[in-house]
Image (cartoon, rainbow, N blue to C red):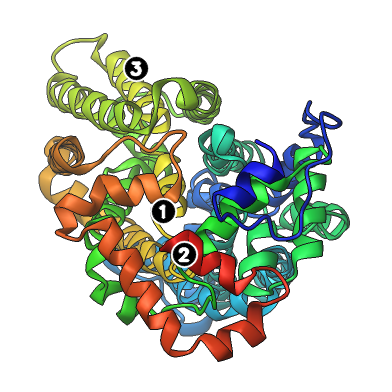
Amino acid sequence: RGERGRRRRGVDTGGVRPRGNKGRICDLSHLIVASLTGAFGSSFLYGYNLSVVNAPAVYIKKFYNETWERRYGFSMDESTLTLLWSITVSIFAIGGLVGAIIVTPIVKFFGRKCTLLLNNVFAVAAAILMSLSQVAGSFEMLILGRIIMGVDAGISLSALPMYLSEISPKEIRGSLGQVTAIFICVGVFMGQVLGLPEIFGTVRISVAALIQVVILPFLPESPRYLLLEKHNTSKAEKAFQTFLGKEDVSQEVEEVLAESRVQRNTKLVSVLQLLRTRAVRWQVITVVVTMGCYQLCGLNAIWYYTNNIFSEAGINRETIPYVTLSTGAVETLAAVSSGLVIERLGRRPLLIGGFGLMIVFFAVLTVSLTLQNNVSWLPYLSIFCILAIIASFCIGPGGIPFVLTGEFFQQSQRPAAFMVAGTVNWLSNFAVGLLFPFIQSGLQTYCFLVFAAICFAGATYLFFVLPETKNKTLNEISLAFAKRNKVSLEMQEMNHYHEERKSSAEQESNFTSSVDNGETKQAIV
């Protein structure tokens, strides 16, 4: 479409003129580098810290006991040790919750890219504390390091999907969004490899942080953030050109400006304002359900306590480390496969199908664990079921909730939405890490039926509520929810327009460099 046609329809091009056919073939190398670098220093560390405490669990407990006996002159009882170990595992989620709460003002002030860079301070500080805990004879340092590492994860799991969703074109938005899930899986696998006995796996954290610090500064900030929040059209255009590898970015700028016509003077909404907005009510509910099921479906329980589960399944102790490594490998392969097919199959079938398969394999795992003392080969069926549950999770539930959170909300609502999603995510993570040992001891082999019920509830909700979002713009997704929210999309836009007219003078002074006021009014009317 030429600029003349856009002008005739009253569409503002923001001063960006098409440059003919030059640059039509996109070079996405910078986009790929940005996603890989951001994920390696962010979601990779999250996955790494989920699994790294599993392999050395026996040695960490021994360290706790020795420290306690040295201080107080007697060994701690088993219940106290179990509680202290559960706190060590689950306290990571409390730090994550803090990170999710503070991420909104940070990304507003510093931007998406700078937030990812500054976040490495938490990672390095946590690595130092945990690596020196044994030397100092202080298990409190290890626990404090886990909290700080959780803060790093809480910030990165909100800032990274936000950054990726804003730099990627809608045609590959889902695949690029899956990079978060893929690197969580890679991190889990590396945590299993490097979390060997007597090595707490902390020195390697600084390596991932260093790679991000070296590469990410040379890549642009989110073009949507530059255009809608910083009102810098020239930098936004250059960022689009860098990420998309083409000169003519007029269509991409036009799509962003189409959103800006509804919210011309972009002001971030608070969490309370977001929750009160009827037009996104069901989007918020859907994000809460998907994020809750993402954690409560039981996969983190498997990561935290894999060795115990395999031991209860009757697997030889010498074989357990190798079986555990296979779980991380299967998860990584499944996440990569999901990233390759998500734009072809869509979000909805992968998400619902993943939960459905988990229900089946949780049921089979329960039967297998219950009858394993009667049949010699059933422990191997238990291993297969655990691998199948992990693969089913990574097909959809493992990464799509982050993608949906970025797709459901407009620019001004996105930070608050990620804060809500992050809060649900980390509270659920904490609950699983803290309560699963007690659930396991209380329900024995039937403990996984609890997770099967949660997967069933999530799949049922998504079947009736979730629309398909692949290749859809924000307005198209809003329209899909409009009937359920009992709000007309046209009425919603008109309400925004009337609000803008009351303060048009103020808005013009803030945004006149990128959008012509007269043409915008004409386009909206």
| Helix, strand or loop status at disc 3 | helix
In the rendered image, the residue lying farthest to the front is 8
User: Taking 143 as reference, is 296 left or right?
Assistant: left
Numbered label attached to residue 405: 1
What residue sits 49% from the left and 46% below the top?
A: 54
**Residue 91 seen in the figure:** no
Crowd around label 1: few <14 · some 14–19 · many ≥20 (10 Å): many
Q: CA distance from mark 3 to mark 2?
A: 39 Å
The x, y position of residue 294, in whole percent, is 33, 47
Numbered label attached to residue 384: 3
Q: Is residue 474 above or below residue 329?
A: below
User: Taking 176 as reference, is 399 left or right?
Assistant: left
Q: Which residue is mark 2?
A: 414
Select label 3 or label 2 by which is in front.
2
Q: Tag 2: residue type?
A: Arg
Q: CA distance from mark 2 to mark 1?
A: 8 Å
What residue sits 81% from the left and 31% below the top?
A: 27
Q: Tag 1: residue type?
A: Thr
